[in-house]
Amino acid sequence: MATRAPRAASKPALGWNDIRPAPVVLVSGTETYLAERAIRKLRDILATEDPSLEVTDLDASDYARGELLSLASPSLFGEPRMIRVANVEKCSDDFLTEALRYLESPASDAYVVLRHGGGVRGKRLLDALRAGTGGAIEVACLELKKDSDKFDFAVGEFRAAGRRITPGALRAVLAAFGDDLAELAAACAQLISDASDEITEGVVDKYYGGRIETNAFKVADAAIAGRSGDALALLRHAVAGGADPVPIVAAFAAKLRTMAKVMGARGSAAAVASSLGLAPWQVERARRDVEGWTEAGLGACFELLADTDERIKGAARDPHFALERMVRGIAARGAI
């Protein structure tokens, strides 16, 4: 009985920022922004090596036979070629067949970049690429879900630019833009480009003080600290400025969830952060926030949050009244 040849082992994937030239580059993962950054970086590397670089684009979902080989074939003047292929996760059968054939003998002076956003379509091709067939490499662009991952991303942006940012300023940027990686990167880039010397909380507030999420977290900070009057004043200011109630409630929920995770956790901030998927500064902040709180009070506030969320999404006529009721309840640490 014939035995099946063992499948070649997958090679470790590179991080998005470690992309480098290779005959074929698989850019995988669901984080579109990081994938676009990685592909732009590769293009810049290749263009620096040879300014005559030709860049062309294909869509694997509506691929026509022969396109890949035609674009990868040597040009009249021998310019290097970069072929960007989108939607490989939706590729046609023709593309799959020809891409597998191409891996057997990649063209010289051609760099094929395959963008696969996830899923099982093209598994044979993915397995071949991940095994390094044809000199292929993989660059993984996974979604940054943990706050600690977003923190590390922002730190990396400032470090790569050789700029200093205070911990408080970094927290403010993350509070304002942590829900959208592209916006977070754009905010970091603007601060790096425009701000001089060390980037402080004052600098961040100057640029982004009107950001809804920043106002929301300021309201939450004041309420959690028990400063009901300050929290209500900040809330009314945010509402007057056009703040949507939904992200305000979301800011409170994010703060209280972190407090609940940290309450009762033992060990150093670094150890607790590692186990919970947080950054050490978040653990330290949450430990300060949770001082004086009880489990019963925190539980009551979660119930209040759920009720407020329902009210602002249509269950009540006056969402602003519901917000103020929530702020008072949280400032009272659940004693409502």
Image (tube, rainbow, N blue to C red):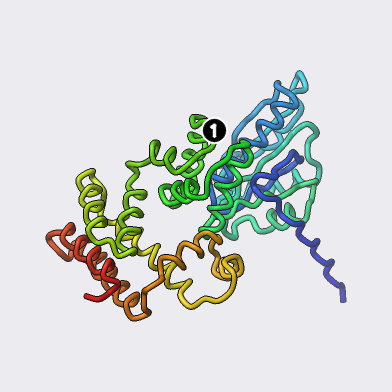
Residue 195, above or below 223: above
Identified at 54% across, 42% down, the residue is: 165
Secondary structure of residue under mark 1: loop
Among all residues in the image, which is located at the extreme left?
317
> For the C terminus, which image quadrant?
bottom left
Name the residue nearer the viewer: 172 or 54. Answer: 172
65 with respect to 326 (left or right):
right
Q: Locate residue 243, reporting x and y percent.
A: 26, 48
Residue 84, image x, y percentages? 63, 37
In the displayed image of the protein, which residue is found farthest to the bottom? 296
Q: As shown in the figure, which amino acid type bears the numbered disc 1?
A: Asp
Whether residue 307 can be seen here:
yes
User: Residue 198 versus residue 90: which sits nearer the camera?
Assistant: 198
Q: What is the number of callouts on the image?
A: 1
Query: Quarter-wise, where is residue 299 in the image?
Result: bottom left
Q: Position of residue 320 (x, y in %)?
A: 18, 57
Q: Is any part of residue 98 visible from this angle?
A: no
Q: Is residue 23 left or right of residue 222?
A: right
Residue at image location 69% in from the left, 27% down from the top: 47
Q: Quadrant of the N terminus?
A: bottom right
* Residue 290 location (% of width, % of height): 41, 70
For label 1, the residue is: 197
Q: Residue at image x 58%, y 47%?
A: 155
- Where residue 329 sits, quadrant-wise, is bottom left
Left or right, residue 1 beside residue 187: right
- Within-10-Å neighbours for mark 1: few <14, some 14–19, many 20+: few
Q: Residue at x 71, y 30 (%)?
A: 46
Q: Nearer the viewer, residue 47 or 300?
A: 300
